[in-house]
Amino acid sequence: MNTELQKSIERFQNHMRYVDEVAMVVLKGHLLIEEALTRIIEKFIFHPEHLEEAKLSFYQKVHLSRSLCLRKNQFKIWELMLRINSLRNELSHALESDERNRKFERVKTMYLEEMPSSEKSENPKEQPDHIVASYACALCAGFLSSFESDASTFKEIVGNIDSILNSMNKQKQ
């Protein structure tokens, strides 16, 4: 067997021997956050088929969702989502890199700053990295869940206004 093929096989085997827990948590957490962002945006629009054609990136969805906030647009949690996205992008394009460690530390630092005081007793600084990543993603998902609930209420109010206006227009005709 040629040496290049042997090196390739060894590298493949080395990387497939174990599950990278941080990568798994970040990739899955990122997907869950993106699903929530999409649902929020869809609450504010009436023809989602046109949005699908726009092929918005995660980054664009974060900024679009942030722009739809009434009062929470300045919360630092939006930056945490962007840091998770940056880490996810690094994980998607490189198995090993110094940049991965720097990006993870940025996520961890931001999470520790934004972490609810009720969770501070658990001391996440002592938790394994994949647990901290999970907490960071869960914090974002929880925030977005609250925002989604507000967006649902908004859509219901708009729907009620639309029904009233339609019935008034029918009465005029």
Image (cartoon, rainbow, N blue to C red):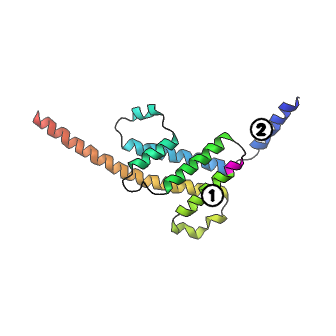
Q: Is residue 21 visible?
A: no
Is residue 83 rendered to the left or right of residue 53?
right
Image position, residue 98 (x, y; %): 71, 49
Q: Is residue 160 above or below residue 52?
A: below
Image position, residue 77 (x, y; %): 50, 56
* Element on which disc 1 rests: helix
Mark 2 nearby-residue class (10 Å; few <14, some 14–19, many ≥20): few
Q: Is 144 one of the magenta-colored residues?
A: no
Query: Where residue 86 is drawn, which disc sits there?
Result: none
Image position, residue 60 (x, y; %): 48, 42
Residue at x 14%, y 35% (from the top left corner): 170
Residue farthest toward the left in the current orientation of the protein: 172
Residue farthest toward the top in the current orientation of the protein: 1
Residue farthest toward the bottom in the current orientation of the protein: 121
Residue at x 33%, y 51% (from the top left corner): 153
Foreground residue among 90 and 13: 90
Query: Where residue 12 is drawn, which disc sits there?
Result: 2
**Mark closer to the chain start, 2 or 1:** 2
* Element on which disc 2 rests: helix
Start and end of the magenta stretch? 95-100
Image position, residue 142 (x, y; %): 48, 55
Q: Quadrant of the N terminus?
A: top right
Task: Give the residue pinned by disc 1.
Answer: 131
Q: Is residue 45 visible?
A: yes
Q: CA distance from mark 2 to mark 1?
A: 26 Å
Q: Quadrant of residue 169?
A: top left
Q: Quadrant of the C terminus?
A: top left
Is residue 124 rendered to the left or right of residue 59?
right
Q: Quadrant of residue 162?
A: top left
Q: Amino acid at mark 1?
A: Ile
Q: Amino acid at mark 2?
A: Phe
